[in-house]
Image: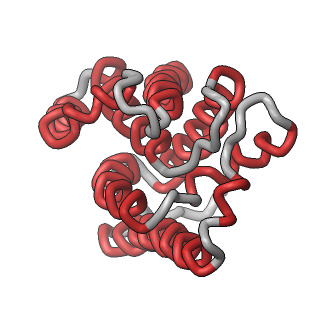
Amino acid sequence: MEPHKSKPTLLQHFKASAFWIVGIVLLMWGVALVNVLLGHQLIVWGIRPRTASGLLGILLSPFLHDGIGHLLVNTIPFVVLGWLVILHGTGMFLEVSVFVILLSGAGTWLFGRSAYHVGASGLIFGYFGFLVARSYYERSLGSILVAFVTILLYGGMLWGVLPLIAHISWEGHLFGLLAGVLAARLLALDSD
């Protein structure tokens, strides 16, 4: 007989969630400070579309930012939307995060403009897409409420998928959003 596994308490879930969210934010800020000290030389480790060196940027770009202002703009939505995703469980948070990072990065690498694409905004757009699409696939009151809050707080960021501002990676935003929606769909199929 298999030993009984106890369900994690609310406090244990909160601690695990905080570990991942705060840990990733601290990593982003640590990298940003090193980048500032190095005169922004780390940007070359971002996604440079259709180059061999840009492939590594798929993994590294969410942790690289083009200055402290860029990171400030990404920190709060990362914490809020990341927290809403992690409410579904740490495992799902990690799955969605890795999936979005890889797919949005690959899309940007394949189709992006010739520039260095850096920042966590592709991941943030992925969380947004995941949370909204999950409500469509799951159709539970909880997921619909989370989608409503997500749209209420961050619905205006959808303008970021359009090529309106030259120095902003709308490609990363677009592919992040699409990756999040696809993650919700695939996880919905998994649970069927």
Q: Is residue 136 above or below residue 83?
A: above
**Residue 108 rendering spot, x and y as whole percentages:** 62, 30
User: Visible in this render: residue 167?
Assistant: yes
In which quadrant of the rendered view does residue 48 lie?
Answer: top right
Tell me if 89 is positioned left or right of 101 in this view. Answer: left
Q: How is the image coloured?
A: secondary structure
**Residue 80 rendering spot, x and y as whole percentages:** 28, 55
| Direction right: furthest residue | 52
**Residue 172 rendering spot, x and y as whole percentages:** 52, 33
Residue at the (69%, 31%) spot, across then down: 109
In which quadrant of the rendered view does residue 159 lie?
Answer: top left
Tell me if 176 is positioned left or right of 115 in this view. Answer: left
Of residues 148 and 173, the one nearer the viewer is 173
Residue at the (67%, 49%) spot, across then down: 46
**Residue 143 rendering spot, x and y as whole percentages:** 25, 33
In which quadrant of the rendered view does residue 127 lie?
Answer: top left
Q: Is residue 136 above or below residue 179?
A: above
The mark total stands at 0
User: Visible in this render: residue 188?
Assistant: no
Tell me if 136 is positioned left or right of 191 in this view. Answer: left
Residue at the (54%, 46%) spot, across then down: 97
Of residues 191 and 158, the one nearer the viewer is 158
Of the 4 image quadrants, the one containing the N terminus is bottom right
Tell me if 189 is positioned left or right of 39 in this view. Answer: left
Of residues 116 and 106, the one nearer the viewer is 116
Residue at the (57%, 48%) spot, across then down: 118
